[in-house]
Image (cartoon, coloured by chain):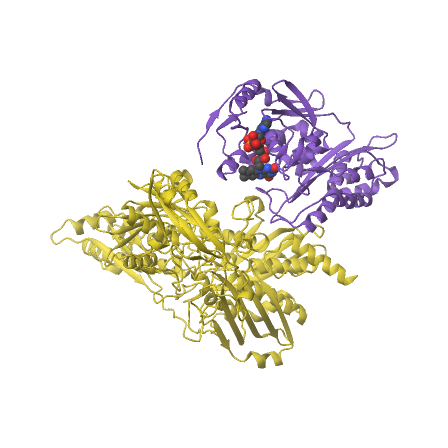
Amino acid sequence: MDGLKFVGKRIPKKDAPLKATGEAIYIQDLKVPGMLYGKILYSKYPHAKILKLDISKASALPGVKAVITGGDVPNNFKFGFLKDNPPLKSGKVLSTRDEIAAVAAVSQEIAEEAIDLIDVEYEELPGIFDPIEAMKEGAALVHEEFPSNVLKMPWKFVHGDVEAAKKESAFIAEDTFSTQWVTHCCLGTSGCVASFDVGNTLTMYSNTQIPSLAQGDFLEALKAFGLKNKRVRIIQTVIGGGFGSKLDTYAYEYIAILLALKTRRPVKIVFSREEEFLATSPRQPTITKISQGCDKDGKLTFREMAMVLDNGAYTSWGATTPSVMMVPISSLYKVPNIKYTAKCVYTNNTYSQAFRGYGNPQATFAIESCLDQLAEKAGIDPVEIRRINANESGEVTPQNFRITSCGMKDCIEEVVKRLDWKNKCKRGNGKGVGMASLIHVGGAARVYKSDGCGTIIKVDDNGKVDVITGASEIGQGSDTIIAQIVAEVLGIPMDDINVINNDTDVCPWDVGAHASRTTFVAGNSALGAAQKIKAQIMEIAAKNLGEPVDALDMQDGIIFSKNDKEKSIPLGKVLRKAHYSLGGRMLVAEHFYDPPNENFDQTFRGNLSVSYAYGAHGVEVEVDRETGQVKILNYIAAHDVGKAINPMLLEGQIYGGGLQGIGYALGERMIYDKGYLKNGNFLDYKMPTVRDVPPVQAVIVESDEQAGPFGAKGIGEPGLVPTAPAIANAIYDAVGVRIKDLPITPEKILRALKEKEGQKA
Amino acid sequence: MGSFEYLRPASISEAIALMEGSGGRGVYIAGGTDVMVLIRQKKIFPGCLISLRNIGDLAYLNTASGLAIGSAVTHNAIAKNEFIQKKYTALTDATNKVGSLQIRNVATMGGNICNAAPSADTACPLLVLDAQAVIAGKDGDRKVPIDDFFLGPNKVALKPGEILKGFAMPAFNGRTGSAYIKHTRRQAMDLPMLGVAARITIRIDGDEIGCKDALCTIDNISNILRRFEDEKLVCEDIRIAMGVVAPRPMRAKKAEEALKGKVISEALFEEIGEIAASECQPRDSIRGEAWYRRDMVKVLTRRAILRAVDRVIRPDDMIWPERLW
Ligand SMILES: Cc1cc2nc3c(=O)[nH]c(=O)nc-3n(C[C@H](O)[C@H](O)[C@H](O)COP(=O)(O)OP(=O)(O)OC[C@H]3O[C@@H](n4cnc5c(N)ncnc54)[C@H](O)[C@@H]3O)c2cc1C
């Protein structure tokens, strides 16, 4: 036994009762005194000149307090990663999600009515919707102020000599793979309430997953709006899912700020489901040319990939996903020679953002599908080629990732065993098995200058503990994990721990809920703070009990001497003694944990993460040859997680990720037709339902990562990374057709089967 | 969402009177699962909603002769009915798969038919079960064969003010089975990409039809049918209906004709599927491509007939668990 009382236990989420009873306050529920309701008018066309924009009727509607248009945005303010996105567009629209006017009114209904009264005349312009077209010489420019539709981004990684390796390879497989737009489908749609006080301090009630960065973004906006040296306070409501969708600030937030400024009243904007589909930023489509080679024994010799990403009309984090894509491209399996380039291309489509996995699923789909193609060419079993090339602890990868702990081989073996691979593969009866592995950052990711998180712990006179953390609880369970860690260090019950996490006026800095980093970074931060506060407590207790500090321990809120169990004192008593005495003190500790990882250098080398997460998924499918429908019979998801702080929450991440991955693989796609979203609703966007959940075994492989809190690594994203290629590989095993563009619909399978039949005939 | 009056008449005649008095701005509402969506999408702007939920005369379910179902009976009530499960199984298949349990608990078959979406799940079963629509108007009731009730997408043969009272289906002999197959991209909360229903009555000269040995309970229907080959099962009567492959749910009449009176076999069903596919006019849409839908008519017609045959040969709940789903 490891002697742990809280860490490693299946403890239910702290916020579960609140959510189950409906008591949790989401942004949808929030009402602020005097609040107005904002609503946004979006462009009718994907590319058009605005000839006329008449707001007079809307302004005259009783109950309407403000109507704003592009002209009301001061100083030509623009936001986003490349600052190419004005919160309200004037003159020209570049996509159907372009915001062109907004209203604040005393009720949601009036705001909606006012929007319908805004009179717009457009002159439609031809649009560019295909990134390949947009890259061509002489293509019309989406942004006339830029010289090319290709974004100026440096995405290129080269290691070794791919050309030489090609010549020496015994087998080479090459192909082109493509992926689609998918969106996060958070149950809690995006929203905010913007509110100024008399001194122009902005309070944003928000469901952002990046409170500290959003604070910076809004401060910058205030400056542009003429409010210098003001303060911004972000208060997070309970968040109904993030998955990356709330990792950037959006136009609606700046619009709410502008409306609040104009009306001097709090303004709430909450997205309808249709808006959530239209106006939040999805995972971007990719077109990937890949070639991989191996020697006669199946050892990988090189990997070459060239990718084109549809950036959409504006730039958010979508354009930076090639950085994280490089993780699997350079380091999934041992590959000595690598060449990777990526181009992000402006189009008149929706612009893309972060989504769980941050590019990794797109890259892994190509790599792992192609690896099976290579295995077939080389006459090697798909499992065997993965065994031969698997990553290992102690490895330094081409990008200079220092692999400290690696459970990849164990994950592969779990899949092989549980899927009964030997007996289930190559049956030729419409059933088949497939697998795919993954690597992801598992110990944070230094994509900003800081990758840190702060924690403050304060203990009151009664022995109750407040943990004030920078970490955002977006449904993943960070509060519970943090409380478990603190409870473990201090030796006090979970119920005595309160986690405060939602107010930038109170909480320390954190870079945000991204990169599967919260358990690792916020956990380490909480661990450090807990150790510091424990030292303070023990020091006081030692004086009280007349025992040396190292003889003391604490359990269930009682401090006792390990030498003499009689000598004990309740935590609360120690604290009161410390507090109610002359020159009394209070007990507060703070700890800022910034992991010892590295930013990439100019060549994209650097130890991005302190540790790396591994996993392998295996799937058994049955394909209906007549209808092309795929049924998942069995799904194994084995993950190297370092150490499971809470196996129940961890399995939740794996189940959820796996199912999101299954949706990505088999059904979900945003259908954009010449810039128009055709299926912005849950009827036609085929997110799997509970009835579609196959039997999933979440297998936890522990590799004990020394740098992680109690040995833990991140697991937030990995669950959906290898899902699509595992399924594609299984379909190939079942019926011999390889589908190279996601999602794998029945139509694509049936068409491929027919083609195959035709070839035979 | 605009505002509207909500009226709750207690009888059919009161409802019709309210509709007359609404000056053309009234809309009947049963479960509301289509009406409310249309209102929220700003596709209709009713001045008043006239609820049909408190009218007992629309909520009957009568099995004295054939089957009579009131228009306000919910999908779930139909799905759970054991008599329907045994004798009108295609309806069970369909009502079981409408939306989700929450939808099935409030949505009605009458609403499904009056809304007349090309994808309405209960349309094909009603077509193959020879249902008549019973219509109540100012001047009394009239009956219309369901095939004549559908006029086009969202268009039915109701005159202004008329209420669909319910459905009347004849009794079928014990050598009859029916099935409906809904082809979807996911297992719940989905409209059909296409749907196919079939009803078949089988004749075998001088003998009872039925599986006599234990193997029958575990083997698949294709194999069982093969074992019946010498006994020459004849298709005495057949109905085939297809949804989402034309502007309205339609019968595959040529396919029916080609099967009627013939000795049945899976190979023949294959041909029947081809004929049905040639009769439909599917379109490309975001929900499915035309070629695929046509292909699936072929496959699902065969499968639906086969399943209906199965239900004649093996009328035992144990062997078709999908009916219990
Ligand atoms: C989430 C969701 C999922 C769904 N899934 C499916 C599905 O899988 N398959 C499917 O087929 N449908 C589906 N639907 C559509 C809908 O639920 C069905 O069509 C349902 O049967 C409609 O019945 P209702 O009682 O709710 O009709 P209502 O909405 O009350 O009425 C529908 C129409 O019929 C009229 N009407 C109703 N009753 C009468 C009557 N007695 N006389 C005259 N006119 C009448 C109304 O005026 C209205 O025009 C779904 C809907 C939702 C919201």
Residue A298 found in image quarter = bottom right
Residue A370 drawn at (x, y percent)? 61, 67
Side (left or right) of B121 relative to A605:
right
Q: On the picture, is A717 further left or further right than A454?
A: right
Which chain is represented by yellow in the image? A
Which one is in front, A32 or A110? A110
Q: Residue at x 60, y 42 (%)?
A: B191
Q: Quadrant of residue A444?
A: bottom left
* Quarter containing the C terminus of chain B: top right
Indicate the chain coloured purple by its letter.
Answer: B
Looking at the rendering, the quadrant in which ligand 1 lies is: top right
Q: Is residue A410 visible?
A: no
Quarter in which the N terminus of chain B is drawn: top left
Q: Is residue A260 left or right of residue A695?
A: left
* Horizontal arrangement in the rendering, residue A180 relative to residue A172 (left or right): left
- A183, above or below B313, in the image: below
Residue A548 spot, x, y in % from top left: 22, 59
